[in-house]
Image (tube, grey):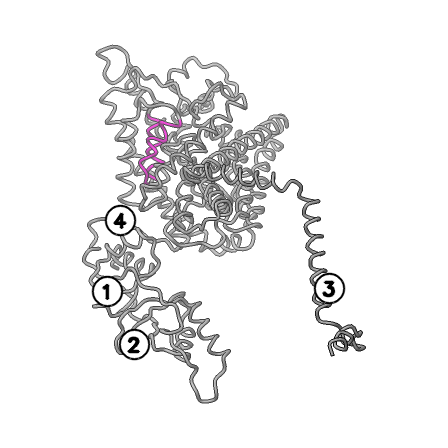
Amino acid sequence: MVHHAEDADRRPPAPGMEPTDCAGADGLREEEEAAERVLVSEKSWRPCPKSRRRLRGCLEFVQRQLFRVGEDWYFLFALGVLMAMISFMMDLIVYRLYEAHRWLYHEVGDYLVLKYLSWTMYPVALTAFSTGFSQSITPHSGGSGIPELKTILTGVMLEDYLAIKNFGAKVVGLTCTLASGSTVFLGKVGPFVHLSAMAAAYLGKMRTTVTKAYEDKFKQNEMLVAAQAVGVATVFGAPISGVLFSIEVMSSHFAVRDYWRGFFAATCGAFMFRLLAVFNSEQETIIALFRTNLKIDFPFDLPETFFFIALGVICGVISCAYLFCQRWLLGYVKENKFTAKLLATDKPVYTVLVVLLLASITFPPSLGQFMASRLSMKEYLISLFDNRTWGELARNASPAVLGEPQRLWQEWCHPAVPFFGTLVFFLLMKFWMLILATTLPLPAGYFMPVFVYGAAVGRLAGETVAALFPDGINAEGGVRPVVPGGYALAGAAAFSGAVTHSVSTALLVCEATGQLAHALPVTLAVLAANGVAQKWQPSFYAGTIIVKKLPYLPPIRSRHMASYRVLTEEFMDRHVPSVAKADGFAEVLAVLTATGDAEFPVVESAAVPTLVGTVSRAELVAFVQSRGEAGTPRGEKPAGTVGDDCAIEPVMLQLSPWTSLHQAHHLFELLKLQRLFVTRFGELVGAVTRAELRRAIEQLADPK
């Protein structure tokens, strides 16, 4: 029997039948061969596996050691250096393009028509290209960008505003705008704050990739706060005032933990920006951007303090008129049928028309000769900050050559008109020309123009005081003449500070010029100007937010307003769609159809509306879809309830109906909230959003 069994085992398998063991063995053998081929392939393309593992371990060790002090240092350093290099390269390109314009203007000879065409067509072509190129890539590249960034920092995310494609559009467009020179009279502070914010957002994404860490909104906000300071510091080379200015202009509330980030990034950016000038052989060492030679042994006499304060009041009054007219014109351009159509469909055409008008007025053989129109923005400041008195220099003046720093003041002198007349004419004409230029739909900054304008106001005041007191105000101890350049410093800081509602411009002037002797009178002038401007007009950026109707929460401007007496129950939304824990398919579907809210409050029941938490719209949509796909017999309701099948988030903060408007406004600003629910003894009675707060504040400010 055993023998026959062995024979049976040795018999070949029947046709069409394969032994199971043999098939498994063959399959295993094929898998082993495939694995060997993969190993051979890996070894052939990646030799020395032990060395590679050691190298990978060393890199991970270095990464751990470098990031032990915090990865923020490296990314903030990269942000500062990157923006400094972009700022320096932009200045270099703008200088070359501006010099090319000057060369073209002089090379055409004495033919008046050719001179006019070379003077006007060059900035027209550059600004038209700036508008068309930037707007064709993204509409968010126009303007300064600070009003939108202020809105983002309050917790409102504007779509595609910090996208990287906007970065290139803004860089190219801003370069062309600045190359048009003082004809258009625009700067780069605001756009550089926007550029720094975009670079910070992109570096934040890179940081999450390198560190494998989750980037929340608070981390992104920290990088944006540092980016503000970098944008100002890499334009003026002033890190301290850059941080303070960004805090004053951009933030309603500032976290002290972000202070060092702003200073570190701004210092890196400002140092690299000035260091590149040394490497380019423009300077021998790191010095101030607009260096002055004001005397520091006796910079001003004590009675002159009165004139500095009076100058601040004058700058405050002029800034109120400027802010009102600028806001009115910006709204008028949007409402007028002709200009609104151009801005909606043909933005480059609108730019061409406006720039052609501005260039024609600044044409040197015509009205431009009374406005020193051949000077660039930097040359304007150098001439206005001159420590010498123009009245004395005019008596022994020799023919000037354009470009010599010591002779730039002669551009303000005309054979038929004294420099007092040219300064007054400059101020009158640039007042409305500057306002008109702010309506252009191209990347541009508006801080530097008001800075130069304020310097001209201060220079006029200083020359007037010097003419009234040629030997100084107090000449008992000898001749101590008045220094008009000090008044120009005070005027630049006071007017720009009044327009932007900031006091840090006093320090900005000192850092940008390297002049600290006039710090006290400059600060007094800035305080006086701000006292007038903040009483009567919103800041330049706040006015732009109002005209553009951005979702920004307006501040409660005065303590005398009855914001403490207005209660939440007076302005809250009482009709708040909610879902109960026991709601099913039909109830949830009805709520989703009725409103498009992103989240909904969850109450205990319709009879007892005790607030339990919130549920997101996506969660409710998934709930409805799952019930609809499951299928139920006809006449039966789908099973399941919100309380059982949805993730309910707890409500961490609630308002009471008796919470004042002032307290609610403070909470929304401090915590960057979008909506809060109002409960009375735990029961849901309403909700407050930014829209309700904004309407309540507007009604409080204007009871009519």
Mark 3 vs mark 1: in front: 3
Outermost residue, top side: 478
Q: Is residue 580 visible from the viewing direction of this image?
A: yes
Q: Please provide percent x and percent y for residue 422.
A: 42, 28
For the residue pair 557 and 5, the one nearer the viewer reads as 5
Provide the residue designation for mark 3.
26
Q: Residues within 10 Å of mark 1 (few under 14, many from 20)?
A: few
Q: Amino acid at mark 4?
A: Arg
Provide the residue designation for mark 2.
605
Mark 3 vs mark 2: in front: 3
Q: Amino acid at mark 2?
A: Ser
| Among numbered discs 2 and 4, the one appearing first in the sequence | 4
Residue that appears at 32% across and 46% down: 252
- Residues drawn in magenta: 487-512
Q: Secondary structure at mark 1?
A: helix
Which label belongs to residue 557?
Answer: 4
| Among numbered discs 4 and 1, the one appearing first in the sequence | 4
Would you say the residues marked 2 and 4 are in contact, meaning their CB atoms lie under 8 Å apart? Answer: no
Mark 2 and mark 4: Cα distance apart in space: 42 Å
Mark 3 and mark 4: Cα distance apart in space: 84 Å
Q: Please provide percent x and percent y for residue 182.
A: 49, 33
